[in-house]
Image: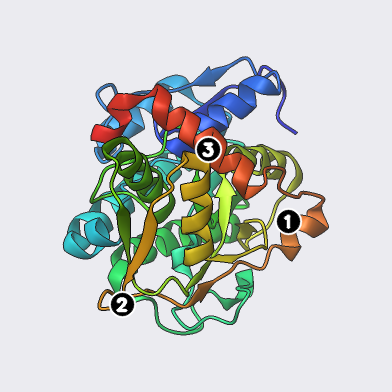
Amino acid sequence: MMEKNAKIYVAGHRGMVGSAIVRELERQGYTNIITRTHKELDLCRQAQVEKFFAEEKPEYVFLAAAKVGGIVANSEALADFMYDNMILEMNVINSAWKNGCKKLEFLGSSCIYPRMAPQPMPESCLLTSELEKTNEAYALAKISGLKYCEFLNKQYGTDYISVMPTNLYGPNDNYHPEHSHVLPALIRRFHEAKESGAKSVTCWGDGSPLREFLYVDDLANLCVFLMNNYSGNETVNAGTGKELTIKELTELVAKVVGYEGEILWDTSRPNGTPRKLLDVSKAAKLGWTYKTELEDGIRLAYKDFLENPMRAER
């Protein structure tokens, strides 16, 4: 268990996940949280990372920093996604190990699992068949970070763990029109359609793919729970175990935002993977389950969107 005054470093504290982990740690009474902005510490620069760890010697590390983006960003910048994520995580994990960090938690993504993985996807299906090509670079980087933690455990007896979240949403999300994920993109589109009085909104595909969504504060709660209650080489899936169609999601977002026009579907556009559901039985067996239902979470996310107009510009 982490002591309340233990020195805890949250890498990526300005992102959606990192900021949620900081909120959760504070909520639970942890008093010695250290953070660095990208300006203060570039995690892609090995010398800077080594200097930071040698000086600060954090006892616990939550590695939530990453170069992320939606399907467009991912498929256009494959080399950048691979290099930045690989370098960043190797620097942090290696420096944590060299400086006697007690425990590190690595945050991945459900895109690490094979394209044709069994549904729902168990942790054990990792590397059993080929990856989805559109985010292969990001997935390979994340798998490498996960495996490096596992190999350090095996070779040096460290206690480094990994968590693989499903689709996330909530405060501090990115609402950029081209570079955001499906749920924040829908919040922005329906909000703008409502504001402009648009008669209809056109969405990609036919709305049939099934997706799972986890509110980011629930993920943060699981991250702290696992840091205190889990050790092992296998990753732990983070999700709700519930799914809905993109069409149902679209209607739910329209309802929360208060958009009353028509929703049209452009079936000439790709649907993406038909189904991506995580098997969350492992987290459940450890004694954890999510708290925030999707409609409540979307309300909270929309409130955050309205309160932070600049966020839409990112």
Label 3 element class = strand
**Cα gap from disc 2 to disc 1, whole angstroms:** 37 Å
**Residue contact between numbered discs 1 and 3, judged by CB atoms under 8 Å:** no
In-front residue for pair 34/25 = 25
Q: Tell me what residue is drawn at x 30 percent, y 40 percent.
A: 192
| Residue 96 image position (x, y, % from top left) | 47, 38
Q: Is residue 287 above or below residue 118?
A: above
Q: Quadrant of the C terminus?
A: top left
Please identify, in this view, whether the residue under mark 1 or under mark 3 is nearer the observer: 1
Residue at image position (48%, 20%) is 34
* Amino acid type at mark 3: Phe
Counting from the top left corner in percent of width and height, residue 189 is at 32, 47
**Whole-number angstrom distance, CA of label 1 to CA of label 3:** 18 Å
Question: In screen coordinates, is 287 left or right of 98?
Answer: right
Question: Is 44 on the left or on the right of 131, as rendered?
Answer: left
Marks 3/2: CA distance? 41 Å
Task: Answer with mark 2 or mark 1, whichever residue precedes in sequence.
Answer: 2
Q: Mark 1 or mark 3: which comes first in sequence?
A: 3
Above or below: residue 145 compared with residue 308 = below
Residue 103 shows in this picture: no
Which amino acid lies under the numbered mark 2 shown in the image of this protein?
Thr
Asked where in the image residue 94 lies, by quadrant, the reply is: top left
Inspect the image, locate mark 1, and give the three-letter code of the amino acid beneath it: Ala
The residue that disc 3 covers is 62
Where disc 1 sits, the SS reads helix
- When the figure is inspected, residue 102 is found, relative to residue 23, above or below; the finding is below
Helix, strand or loop for disc 2:
loop
Q: Position of residue 237 (x, y in %)?
A: 62, 59
**Residue that numbered label 2 is attached to:** 267
Q: Which residue does the numbered mark 1 point to in the structure image? A: 283
Query: Closest to the observer: 125 or 59?
Result: 125
- Few, some or many residues within 10 Å of mark 2 (<14, 14–19, 20+): few
